[in-house]
Image (cartoon, grey):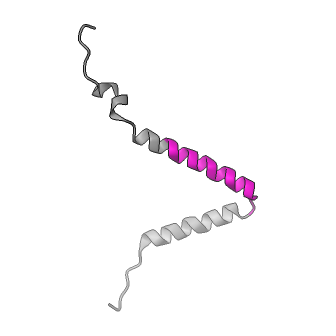
Amino acid sequence: MGATTPIRAIEMVRAIRDRLAQEWADKSPAELVRLLNVAGAQARDDAARRHRDSTSNPRMEPTRSGQ
């Protein structure tokens, strides 16, 4: 067990962390809160779009007779 295998995901996350730290270094706390709130709202919207109830899809609803 002498050899190790680098884990690329860890390096990717570290690179993202370092890049964000540089971008956010000159931001005020209020600006950071605003940025994170916008990102959170976008993530919630994306999640809601991906997890819609099947009844919201007209193709999944039963056909109506007499129309």
In depth, the one of 10 and 32 nearer the eye is 32
Where does the magenta region start and end?
A: 26-45
Which residue is painted at 44% across and 68% down in the image? 9
Which residue is painted at 51% across and 41% down in the image? 45
- Quadrant for the N terminus in the image: bottom left
Q: Position of residue 67 (x, y in %)?
A: 28, 8
Q: Position of residue 66 (x, y in %)?
A: 24, 7
Residue 4 in the image: above or below residue 40:
below
Q: Main secondary structure of the magenta part?
A: helix
The stretch drawn in magenta includes residue 64: no
Residue 28 in the image: above or below residue 58:
below
Q: Position of residue 57 (x, y in %)?
A: 35, 29
Q: Which image quadrant for residue 48?
A: top left
Which residue is painted at 55% across and 68% down in the image? 15
Q: Please identify the residue farthest to the bottom as the structure is shown.
A: 2
Q: Please identify the residue farthest to the top as the structure is shown.
A: 66
In the image, taking residue 34 as reference, residue 56 lies left or right, namely: left
Which residue is painted at 58% across and 67% down in the image? 17
Q: Which image quadrant for residue 53?
A: top left
Q: Which image quadrant for residue 62?
A: top left
Q: How many marks?
A: 0
Residue 55 in the image: above or below residue 44:
above
Q: Position of residue 33 (x, y in %)?
A: 68, 54
